[in-house]
Image (spheres, rainbow, N blue to C red):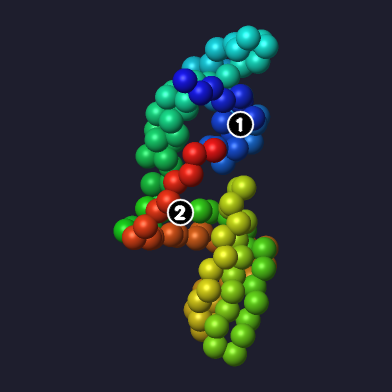
Amino acid sequence: MQSYTIGQAARLLGVSPDTARRWADAGRVATHRDESGRRVIDGASLAAFSVEIAQSEDDDAPYTSARNAFPGIVTAIKLGDVAAQVTIQAGPHRLVSLLTREAVEELGLEVGMQATARVKSTSVHIDRT
C-alpha cells in the first residue's frame, strides 16, 4: 500500500505541513515510521481522514448541488466587452473560469479577494500519479 509523508499528505489535504503534523501529533490521523525513519501515513488512513475532514468543514457553506468547492484567492481578472476570465488559486490548484462581465461586476470580484470556485461536471477523468 502507498504511504505519504507529512508534506505529501498536507498538499493532498490542502493544508500546511505544520497543520498536518499537528493533526498527526494529536492522533487525528495515524502515522508510522518508514524504513528511512520518516513519519508517513498509509494511503487508506489518509483517504478516510480526508473524507472525515471534508464532511466536517464549513457548516455555513451555501446549499448547492456542486460538490467540488475550491476556496481560494482571485489572482487575475481579464474583462472583455461581454465576457470575462477569472483565475483563482486554490491551494495547489489554479482554476480559470469564463463568465460574463456582468457576473464579475455583480459579484464585485477583484484581484486579491477570497472566492470559491465550484465545479460541476458530467465527466470526471482520474489519472493515477
Could you say where residue 126 lies in the image, as x and y percent from the top left? 44, 46
Residue displayed at 63% across by 81% down: 79
Residue farthest toward the front in the current orientation of the protein: 128
User: Is there any visible trace of residue 28 in the rendered image?
Assistant: no
Is residue 112 visible in this depiction of the protein? yes
Vertical placement of residue 2 versus 57, above or below:
above
> How many marks are shown on the rendered structure?
2
Say left or right for 56 vs 19: left
Mark 2 neighbour density, 10 Å: few (under 14) some (14–19) many (20 or more): some
* Mark 2: amino acid: Ala
SS at circle 2: strand
**Which residue position holds label 2?**
69
Q: Amino acid at mark 1?
A: Gln
Q: Which mark is residue 8?
A: 1
Figure quadrant of residue 95: bottom right
Instruction: Say which residue appears at 59% left-offset and 90% top-offset.
Output: 81
Residue placed at 53% from the left, 54% from the top? 71
Q: Nearer the viewer, mark 2 or mark 1?
A: 1
Relative depth, front residue between 34 and 62: 34
Q: Earlier in the sequence, mark 2 or mark 1?
A: 1
User: What is the quadrant of the C terminus in the image?
Assistant: top right
Up/down of 83 relative to 21, above or below:
below
Residue 76 location (% of width, % of height): 67, 68
